[in-house]
């Protein structure tokens, strides 16, 4: 009897070990659907209607592929991981990846080196993130929300190599940062037109976009994103690109809206070059401690040679406008190829306004900028009053800011500055207030298709639009003015 019990225990233990290994596709060049996986391993994955349930680890082998082209929900068990060595293609209109129990997240997705990953129109939630070890990675028009640290610990999307394409997504309220790369990974992704809000709910000392070194010849491109902080989090910055390991930084940071973070944009380390253009950087002051952060743009380097060109930025209501430390440097406008046209307003702390603090011994060129928007047009004295440099402390570098210029501020800029739209993101109902000049609102899809036209009244307007979740462009038109805002529908 004891021998029989021992034999049964051995059999059950062996079966348990097999179950714990999950299912690995056969590596025969096969393409699988979820239904194929149900047939191949019904103990790993089951189906009821359009809802599939994964209760054990799943591995797609190097020569195999998993395609999801129909609208499905894949519920995943606690701590379960999906690993892909081959191909993973999601191109349904609405595929959902979620936890069986949202209180016990799954471990997430691990995309191995040389895998081919294309994820479109998906919702990825209540898991452990996406660890991207491959160079061939695209995620587009997806909702990535309420994930935790799991297989990916640095960010909900963590990158290791290549030029990942991260476009048109909504990335919100994850426990970790939104997007990151390793300190020495030399990654240059294209991060375009994403709505990013309230990430790093753990409130660690990391920005929502937290990138390390880049490729030498191919820049990281962070373009036309909204990066909005959660004001209850006092440690979370907006965008940072850092080089602490002897690599290089080659960055293009253009046309972003960065608001309500601990700081706006930080470029840290040596061998850094790039462009920072046409960004709206406002109210990045959540920590409230000027000795620890709060800059609209912050640059720091330990050796000379930093080459950052900045123009067209709107920098308002941060604890500092732009701060330069160590041996960092920036070109804010010259008489050659940089038009300047940066706008500063109400950046300050302790009752003092700081548009630019050159806390280095480097000479800085900063021509053709509007240094005090509220008092336009500016005089040289107006600019001098908000710039800290050699004229204030003899050991600091001289800032050349003559000529100053606020004439480039257009009617569109001023009108857009007044108008307010909230809540954003929205479920479809929102208000447009402080309208002083616009009479019509056109709503466009992200690919430029006109969806709705509405009349605008001077003052306050309320709308309830029946829109699918995604990112939309709102064009406000007046007789002599036009402006565009971005609307995110949940």
Image (cartoon, helix red, strand yellow):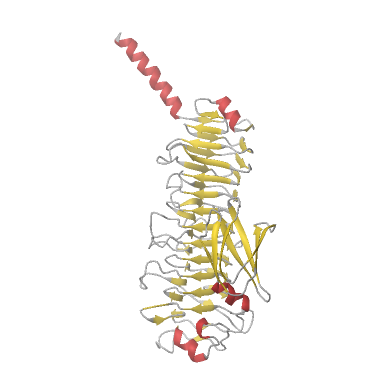
Q: Is residue 194 left or right of residue 452?
A: left
Instruction: Please tell me which residue is depicted at 43% across the width and 47% down the height of the picture.
Output: 148
Estimate the x, y position of residue 386 in percent, counting from the top left. 45, 84
Could you say which quadrant of the image residue 431 lies in? bottom right
Q: Is residue 381 above or below residue 152?
A: below
Q: Is residue 295 left or right of residue 426?
A: left
Residue that protrudes farthest toward the top in the picture: 1
Estimate the x, y position of residue 316 in percent, counting from the top left. 49, 74
Nearest the eye: 331 or 259? 259
Nearest the eye: 158 or 74? 74
Q: How many marks?
A: 0
Residue 241 showing in the rendered view: no
Q: Is residue 179 above or below residue 438?
A: above
Instruction: Please tell me which residue is depicted at 48% across the width and 62% down the height of the picture.
Output: 228
Could you say which quadrant of the image residue 284 lies in? bottom left
Estimate the x, y position of residue 401 in percent, counting from the top left. 53, 86
Estimate the x, y position of residue 341 in percent, counting from the top left. 58, 79
Could you say which quadrant of the image residue 412 lies in? bottom right
């Amino acid at each position: 009897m004891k021998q029989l019990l021992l034999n049964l225990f051995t059999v059950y233990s062996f079966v348990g070990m097999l179950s714990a290994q999950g299912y690995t596709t056969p590596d025969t060049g096969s393409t699988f659907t979820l239904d194929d996986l149900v047939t191949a391993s019904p103990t790993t994955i089951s189906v009821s209607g359009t809802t599939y349930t994964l209760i054990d680890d799943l591995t797609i082998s190097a020569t195999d592929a998993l395609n999801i082209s129909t609208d499905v929900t894949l519920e995943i068990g606690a701590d379960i991981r999906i690993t892909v060595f081959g191909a993973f293609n999601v191109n349904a209109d609405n595929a959902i990846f979620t936890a069986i129990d949202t209180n016990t997240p799954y471990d997430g997705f691990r995309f191995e080196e040389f895998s081919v990953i294309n994820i479109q129109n998906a919702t990825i939630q209540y898991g452990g993130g996406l660890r991207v070890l491959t160079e061939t990675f695209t995620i587009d028009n997806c909702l990535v929300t309420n994930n935790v640290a799991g297989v990916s610990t640095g960010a909900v999307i963590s990158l290791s190599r290549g030029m990942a394409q991260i476009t048109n997504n909504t990335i919100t309220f994850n426990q970790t940062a939104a997007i990151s790369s390793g300190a020495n990974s030399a990654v240059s992704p294209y991060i375009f037109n994403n709505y990013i809000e309230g990430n790093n709910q753990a409130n660690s000392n990391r920005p929502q976009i937290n990138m390390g070194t880049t490729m030498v010849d191919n820049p990281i491109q962070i373009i036309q994103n909204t990066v909005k902080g959660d004001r209850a989090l006092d440690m979370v910055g907006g965008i940072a690109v850092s080089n602490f390991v002897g690599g290089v930084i080659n960055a293009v940071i253009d046309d972003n809206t960065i608001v309500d973070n601990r700081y706006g944009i930080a470029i840290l380390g040596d061998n850094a070059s790039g462009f920072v253009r046409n960004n709206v950087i406002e109210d990045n002051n959540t920590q409230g401690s000027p000795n620890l952060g709060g800059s609209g743009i912050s640059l720091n380097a330990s050796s000379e040679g930093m080459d950052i060109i900045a123009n067209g930025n709107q920098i308002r209501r941060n604890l500092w406008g732009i701060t330069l430390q160590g041996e960092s440097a920036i070109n804010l406008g010259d008489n050659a190829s940089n038009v300047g046209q940066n706008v500063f307003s109400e950046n300050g702390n302790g009752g003092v306004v700081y548009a630019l603090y050159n806390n280095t011994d480097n000479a800085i060129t900063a021509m053709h900028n509007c240094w005090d928007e509220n008092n336009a047009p500016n005089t040289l004295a107006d600019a001098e009053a908000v710039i800290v440099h050699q004229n204030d402390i003899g050991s600091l570098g001289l800032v050349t800011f003559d000529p100053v210029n606020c004439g480039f501020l257009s009617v569109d800029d001023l009108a857009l500055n007044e108008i307010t739209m909230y809540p954003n993101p929205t479920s479809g109902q929102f208000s447009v207030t402080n309208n002083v000049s616009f009479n019509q609102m056109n709503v466009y899809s992200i690919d430029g298709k006109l969806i709705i036209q509405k009349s605008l009244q001077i003052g306050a307007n309320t709308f309830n639009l029946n829109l699918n979740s995604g990112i939309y462009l709102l064009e406000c038109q007046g007789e002599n003015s036009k402006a565009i805002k971005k609307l995110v529908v949940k």
